[in-house]
Amino acid sequence: MPTNSQLEVIASDGTVSLLSQSGQVIDQPSGGELPIRQVAQGPISNYRVISTAESYHIRYIKSDTGFIYDYYPQTNNEVRLTNTSLPRITNALWLADDLVYINYNNDGRDVNYLAHIDITNGSLDGQIFPPEISSIVASDDQILYLVMDDSGSSLYRYNANSGSSQFLLASDLQQADLLIDQETKEVYLASKINPSSSQVLYRVNPGTYRLELLPTRSQKGAGFVIASGTIMQLEKDSAKIYKQNESEPTIVGEIFSTAGKCQTASNIIETQEIICSITDLDDRDQRNWPFNWFMGQLKPSERIVSIDTNFGGYFDIIDLENVYDIEKLQVTPEYLYFISRRTGGLYEVFRGSVL
């Protein structure tokens, strides 16, 4: 693992070299795994960790072609699954192992496409969704999505078998995102990060489909991370951790991060940690955080940390310097995965027996 005086450089073949501050190559110790390597060259739109009884692998989609690949970390092999081309993808969200929601540009027109992967013939088959959709999640066997209009947002449930949608509820939130706890399958509605208004979070009651306002409110919100029944609200320079059956949140102090730099999924059941990248900022950048990051105005030095959800402390996993600018972080027992906003590539961080 590099120290503060070392920098990792990744070649196009995925090999890693450690450089000292003077630019000299530092020999890697023999016999161990490299702490970080590039899984796939960019641009990668998004990916999903797929678990089986024996192991797991990574499924990802390329932004420039729309082709989908599987990567097997145990053998370092890559397999292309599809032949259907969907160029100019702006965003993709995996809803299931074989279901991906894709936003792409077709001759200047933005298209929302819910695609099913047919591995037998390498095709993507699906249907066009309304252009007003702002957010979408999958919970067990149902797909929920938000449609925005001038009066607020409406929540719908999509039935994949019939191809029809059912209206569930309306909210006056005009800028909102759907969030889901991957373990409990509970669904939440969060107001988007806005410098001029507070950020609020609602739980969607699964029985009545009514919104329940949660006691998480901040004028300087930087997003929510929800994992294993725990809610972490990121603020401008700190975080609050809310756990079920506890009246007061646990405070995490002196942490500059945002939901975009924290884990989006975990393959670890009942974990007591949340993984995030925290940034090292000067006074000026701290004042403008996190909006300067959203606008691409920063090249932050950062380190990936494990935040203890019981006590609020954290420890460093790896120092990334200012090479990657990570997002879309996912967690497995042995590895962390993220996409670099700098290169668009997909990377793997070896944790070994840290967990």
Image (cartoon, helix red, strand yellow):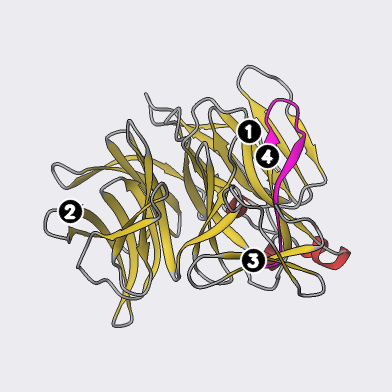
Q: Disc 1 versus disc 4: distance between alpha carbons?
A: 6 Å
Say which residue label 3 marks: 17
Say which residue label 4 marks: 306
Say which residue label 2 marks: 119
Q: Are marks 1 and 4 in contact (CB under 8 Å)?
A: yes
Say which residue label 1 marks: 273
Name the amino acid type tagged 1. Glu
Q: Are marks 3 and 4 in contact (CB under 8 Å)?
A: no
**Quick one: label 4 or label 2, which is nearer the N terminus?**
2
Q: Are marks 2 and 3 in contact (CB under 8 Å)?
A: no
Span colored in magenta? 306-324
Q: Are marks 3 and 1 in contact (CB under 8 Å)?
A: no
Q: Position of residue 63 (x, y in %)?
A: 38, 70
Q: Disc 3 versus disc 4: distance between alpha carbons?
A: 25 Å
**Quick one: label 1 or label 4, which is nearer the N terminus?**
1
Residue at 54% x, 27% y is: 229
| Left or right relative to 149: residue 68 | left
Whether residue 151 appears in magenta in the rendering, the answer is: no
Instruction: Say if residue 148 shows up in the picture.
Output: no
